[in-house]
């Protein structure tokens, strides 16, 4: 895994992101140089090398998938009015809203350019996967916005939404990497399902960190989902398990946007503590994690070839064998 991380780091160090006009490309370079975990290109390389592929075979696909992911973050931060990303000011805060929109649009086009730079016998299938993934991510974002104004959102609805918004991009990165290496169809499908369940677990953990994470580690202000009245797994599970009095208070809190948002966050977390929401979310994360493991083990390659993805799972969920 460390080798893969180093390879991805080198790819981005070697790539030139600044072009003219600089006002358009500087926010793109700023975003792509912020780093982060770069999980998606790492997963693409891991899947490719699992079936005997080489870095140069997927160099531009790896940069392309991360460029697309960061395009979604630029627009997501703007829609959510998030001030921080990876501990740094978001693009719309550092520059302005119009810049975030235009630079984001350019990143989407650049992602396509990166994929088109590398010919491959399965390029049409690869591009179809990338395109469908992009559409599904946007569908997930729309559902996410819809849920902010709906009162009858279920946990099943929420899991469907995060599957689209988050999980399909992880799964798509894995599938694309495997397709470049001409992997068998059954293995590609198991790898895709591994990515789906890993993505669901990852997003559920992200939800948990929004309420309970350390801002220095998380890179974002905690409690933002509560301030924004977002229907995350935490509030949906809390409403399912709450007493009538707790449910009434939670519904009231999530229907308001008070000036003193900190008091609102504090009170919501107090009710979560009374219900034991943290443990329920951790159990849901474990369920998806276990399903991801099952699909990974079903892939017909040597166990050593699966080790990078196992290490990635350990790192993402801070697990020790």
Image (cartoon, rainbow, N blue to C red):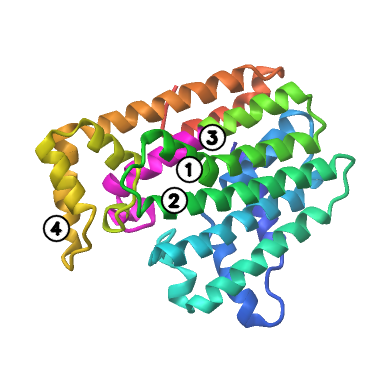
Which residue, given by chain and number where applicable, does mark 4 sit on?
263
* Residue range corresponding to the magenta coloring: 198-224
Which label sits in the foreground, 3 or 2? 2
Which label sits in the foreground, 3 or 1? 1
Which label sits in the foreground, 2 or 4? 2
Which residue, given by chain and number where applicable, does mark 3 sit on?
312
Cα separation between marks 3 and 1? 24 Å
Find residue 144 and name its label: 2
Residue 193 appears in which quarter of the rendering? top right
Helix, strand or loop for disc 3: helix
Helix, strand or loop for disc 4: helix
Helix, strand or loop for disc 1: helix
Residues at discs 3 and 2 in contact (Cβ within 8 Å) = no
Residue at 18%, 46% (x, y): give it.
Answer: 250
Which residue, given by chain and number where applicable, does mark 1 sit on?
161
Neighbor class of circle 2 (other Cα within 10 Å; few <14, some 14-19, many 20+) is many
Residues at discs 2 and 1 in contact (Cβ within 8 Å) = yes
Left or right placement of residue 277 versus residue 28 in this view? left
Cα separation between marks 2 and 1? 7 Å
Left or right placement of residue 75 versus residue 258 in this view? right
Find residue 212 and name its label: none
């Amino acid at each position: 895994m460390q080798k893969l991380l180093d390879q991805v780091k080198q790819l981005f160090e070697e790539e030139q992101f600044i072009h003219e006009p600089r006002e358009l490309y500087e926010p793109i370079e700023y975003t792509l140089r912020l780093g982060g975990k770069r999980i998606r290109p790492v997963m693409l390389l891991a899947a490719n090398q699992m079936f005997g592929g080489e870095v140069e075979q997927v160099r531009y696909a790896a940069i392309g998938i991360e460029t697309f992911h960061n395009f979604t973050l630029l627009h997501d931060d703007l829609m959510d009015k998030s001030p921080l990303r990876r501990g740094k000011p978001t693009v719309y805060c550092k520059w302005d809203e119009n810049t975030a929109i235009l630079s984001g649009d350019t990143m989407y086009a650049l992602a396509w350019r990166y994929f088109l730079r590398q010919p491959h016998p399965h390029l049409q299938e690869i591009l179809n996967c990338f395109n469908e993934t992009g559409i599904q991510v946007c569908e997930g974002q729309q559902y996410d916005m819809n849920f902010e104004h709906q009162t009858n959102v279920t946990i099943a609805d929420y899991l469907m939404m995060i599957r689209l918004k988050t999980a399909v991009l992880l799964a798509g990165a894995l599938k694309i990497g495997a397709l470049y290496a001409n992997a068998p169809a059954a293995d590609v499908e198991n790898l895709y399902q591994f990515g789906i369940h890993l993505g669901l677990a990852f997003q559920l953990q992200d939800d948990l960190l929004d309420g309970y994470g350390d801002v220095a580690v998380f890179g974002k202000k905690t409690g933002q989902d509560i301030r924004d009245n977002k229907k995350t797994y935490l509030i949906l599970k809390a409403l399912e398990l709450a007493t009538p009095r707790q449910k009434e208070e939670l519904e009231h809190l999530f229907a308001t946007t008070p000036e003193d948002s900190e008091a609102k966050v504090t009170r919501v977390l107090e009710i979560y503590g009374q219900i034991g929401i943290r443990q329920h979310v951790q159990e849901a994360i474990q369920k998806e994690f276990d399903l991801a493991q099952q699909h990974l083990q079903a892939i017909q390659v040597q166990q050593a070839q699966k080790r990078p993805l196992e290490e990635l799972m350990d790192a993402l969920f801070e697990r020790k064998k």
